[in-house]
Image: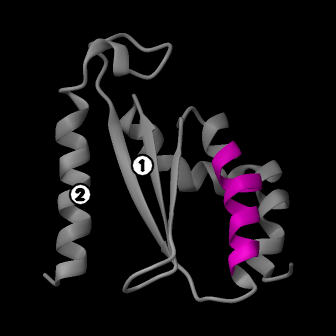
C-alpha cells in the first residue's frame, strides 16, 4: 500500500472512529444523540487551469445540493491549493444511513435534475 492510499484509509478510519465519540451537542441536527454516523471521504485531484472553475460550479451547483436532497449532509467541502498533489478537493459526506452513502452515486445517476445541473462538468463545457 502506498503512502497516499494509507493516509486516505487512515483518515477515513479516524473519521469513522470519532463518529461514536462526539458529544451530544455535536450531532447533526434532527438526529438522536445515539444515532450512528457514517462518513465517506472523497478526494478529487485537479489540474490547474480553467477546469477548476468548472469543478467549483459542479460541486456547488450540482453535486452538493443533490447529495443534500438524498439526505447526506451537511457536506464538508475542503480545497487544497498548496503542496504536493494540488490542487485537490476533499468532500466529507456524513449520513446516518450507510446504505445512503453506498448507493448515492447510483441515485444521482437516476436524478434528472442532477444530470442536467452536472452536464457542463461532464461535457467539459464552461
Q: Judge left or right: residue 71 versus residue 10.
A: right
Task: Please determine whether, in this image, residue 3 is positioned above or below residue 15.
Answer: below
Where residue 15 appears, as percent x and y from the top left, is 25, 45
- Label count reads 2
Q: Judge left or right: residue 65 versus residue 120.
A: left
Where residue 63 appears, as percent x and y from the top left, is 66, 54
Foreground mark, 2 or 1, reads 2
Question: Dividing the image into 4 quarters, which one contains the C terminus?
Answer: bottom right
- Name the outermost residue toward the front: 82
Q: Residue at x 61, y 48 (%)?
A: 107
**Residue 38's quadrant in the figure?**
top left
Task: Give the structural element (helix, strand or loop) at label 2.
Answer: helix
Task: Give the structural element (helix, strand or loop) at label 1.
Answer: helix
Give the alpha-carbon distance from disc 2 to disc 1, as whole Å: 18 Å
Q: Which residues are magenta?
A: 52-65
Q: Residue at x 13, y 81 (%)?
A: 1
Residue designated by label 2:
11
Task: Please determine whether, in this image, residue 33 is positioned above or below residue 123.
Answer: above
**Residue 48's quadrant in the figure?**
bottom right
Q: Residue at x 69, y 89 (%)?
A: 49
Q: For the stretch drawn in magenta, what is the main secondary structure?
A: helix
Task: Please determine whether, in this image, residue 4 is positioned above or below residue 31.
Answer: below
Identify the mark nearer the N-term, 2 or 1.
2
Residue designated by label 1:
102
- The residue closer to the viewer here, 48 or 18, is 48
Q: Judge left or right: residue 84 versus residue 78.
A: left
Where residue 72 appears, as percent x and y from the top left, is 53, 37
- Colouring: one colour
Amino acid at each position: 500500500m502506498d503512502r497516499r492510499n494509507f493516509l486516505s484509509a487512515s483518515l477515513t478510519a479516524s473519521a469513522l472512529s470519532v463518529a461514536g465519540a462526539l458529544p451530544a451537542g455535536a450531532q447533526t441536527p434532527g438526529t438522536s444523540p445515539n444515532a450512528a454516523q457514517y462518513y465517506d471521504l472523497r478526494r478529487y485531484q485537479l489540474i490547474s487551469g480553467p477546469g477548476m472553475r468548472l469543478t467549483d460550479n459542479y460541486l456547488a451547483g450540482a453535486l452538493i445540493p443533490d447529495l443534500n436532497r438524498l439526505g447526506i449532509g451537511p457536506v464538508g467541502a475542503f480545497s487544497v491549493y498548496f503542496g504536493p498533489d494540488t490542487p485537490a478537493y476533499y468532500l466529507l459526506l456524513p449520513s446516518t444511513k450507510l446504505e445512503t452513502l453506498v448507493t448515492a452515486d447510483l441515485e444521482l445517476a437516476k436524478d434528472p435534475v442532477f444530470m442536467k445541473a452536472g452536464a457542463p462538468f461532464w461535457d467539459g463545457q464552461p
